Amino acid sequence: MTVVTARTVDPAEVLDRAIKSLKMLDTPLPLEDVDRALKLVPSDARLWHVKGLIHREQERRDLAIPALKRATELAPSEPLIAHGYARTLLEAGLPSVDAFGRALKLAPNNPDVTRGLVASLSAIGRSAEALAGLETVLRRSPLWTEGHVLLANLRWAEGEREGFTRSFEEALAQHPNSLELRREQLAALLEAEHFEEVFSRVAEGRRMFGDHILFSSHEVAALSESGNIAEADPLFSQLAELNFSNIDMWRVRHLIRAGRPDEASSVIDRWLGSSDEDLFWAYAATAWRMTGDSRSDWLEGDQRFVGVYDITDKLPAMDRLADTLRRLHVSKSQFFGQSVRGGTQTDGHLFQRIEPEIVALRDAVRSVVAEHAAQLPAVDPRHPLLRWRPKQVDFNGAWSVRLVGGGNHANHVHPMGWLSSAFYVVLPDDFGKDKAGWLTLGEPQAQLGVGVQPHRFIEPKPGTLALFPSWMWHGTRKFDEGERITVAFDVAAGRAPGS
């Protein structure tokens, strides 16, 4: 008879190994050893903390939360543990304001904790408190640039369309030499298409700093985006020699808008194959279609790139999912820079939540994405979709969009994703008349002012999931009345085996 004895563990060694594993990709997480160690030292807050973090990494926040809660009970004055517990509650969609409040007392100057508290208040409709609290923090820390960006976004989402960047001005009154503050304010104003304010801030900056690249780059972008082609042309020519990818991206938009796609293609070609090429694929698709470049078919022509799947049989009742999603739409409007028009978009990573309906949706779409990836053409290291094959399906982000009558998605792309999506939950009764509410693929942003039409329309149906390359232009046609609820996500890229 063979007697099997349980393997003994060294709690200190297990803790060290678990911490290292959590910091590394594709490294096995030693959950079983952590559980064995906890049997030896059940009051070790650090082991409970890493146990919770491992469960969180494994997308089991339902198991992570009790472990992290136990860690906070054992080490109530440890700010890192308090923040981890609060953040996991927020991600899971559970009440987290009190937990963030405790974390903030332990780490009053931690910007991540402040961001979390703002998000937790906003998530339950207490936006006024979030705004007031963030304003207080920024008066105390006026050089926290990211906080000013967050405040501007919150003000915009609450319906403020004028003066939403005023906290930057208040901070600059104290720190007029901060180019970082000026850069982020200009970026926010440009994103919101407040071009006259961009010109005003540029003039102010030049009076202090002279002709700095920060001001000339934002000025020329605002000139082009507002339709002043003739004024922007010579300025773009002067900046071209700098060889900055972000400036060349604006220049490509300018050349397409000016009706010179051949010149745009020449600029694009210089960046393809570089680490910044993802900024240019959507514009390459447009320029190549406009010029009849044979690479257009290579880039977008294969029908296997786009998939439409009915996943109703993999999900709980759609009305339950719709009710769950409706409760998450608490803001008054979208953040600036989002494609939503006439509706709202949820904040945070939807697929991190633990509601059963959302967990079921996440698991269903993960299996369908794997099926879609398996049927793609052979690996092509030059192609932005075919150069990757994810070893597992991970999500860069997920969110829900709720549109009401007259709403739509402006054409846009997701440069940080590999595959993007639209899953249809609720649609108006009159959807589809003259393709109202349909998904369009391949039609560039209206701001570019070109007549390139969609190369594909997809008819929405409840329970249908559409998948397409993240760099492919996509949007929706307007509809007249009713409600439209969707879920969208970006699949993270992964390298092909051996690459």
Image: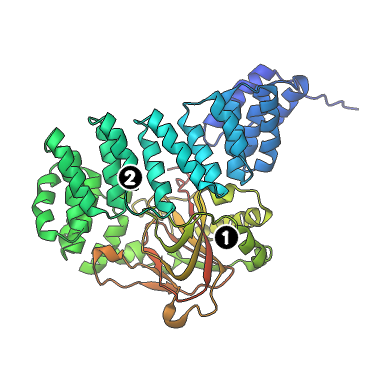
* Residue type pointed to by label 1: Val
Q: Quadrant of residue 369?
A: bottom right
| Secondary structure of residue under mark 2 | loop
Residue 431 in percent (x, y) is at 50, 77
Of badges 2 and 1, the one in the foreground is: 2
Q: Relative to 45, say whether 472 is above or below.
A: below
Task: Identify the colour scheme used.
Answer: rainbow
Q: Amino acid at mark 2?
A: Thr
The percent coordinates of residue 241 (x first, y second) are 12, 43
Tell me whether the residue at label 2 lies in contact with that at label 1, contact meaning CB atoms closer than 8 angstroms. Answer: no
Identify the residue under disc 1.
368
* 93 lies above or below 401: above
Specify the quadrant that holds the C terminus.
top left
Of 120 and 317, the residue lying toward us? 120
In the image, residue 413 sits, relative to residue 481, either above or below, namely above
The kind of secondary structure element at disc 1 is helix
Q: Position of residue 102 (x, y in %)?
A: 60, 29
Residue beneath disc 2: 165
**Could you say where residue 289 lies in the image, as x and y percent from the top left?**
26, 68
Is 474 placed left or right of 211 in the picture? right
Q: Quadrant of the N terminus?
A: top right
Residue 369 or residue 78, whichever sits in front: 78
The image quarter in which residue 66 lies: top right
| Residue visible at 67% across and 27% down in the picture | 71
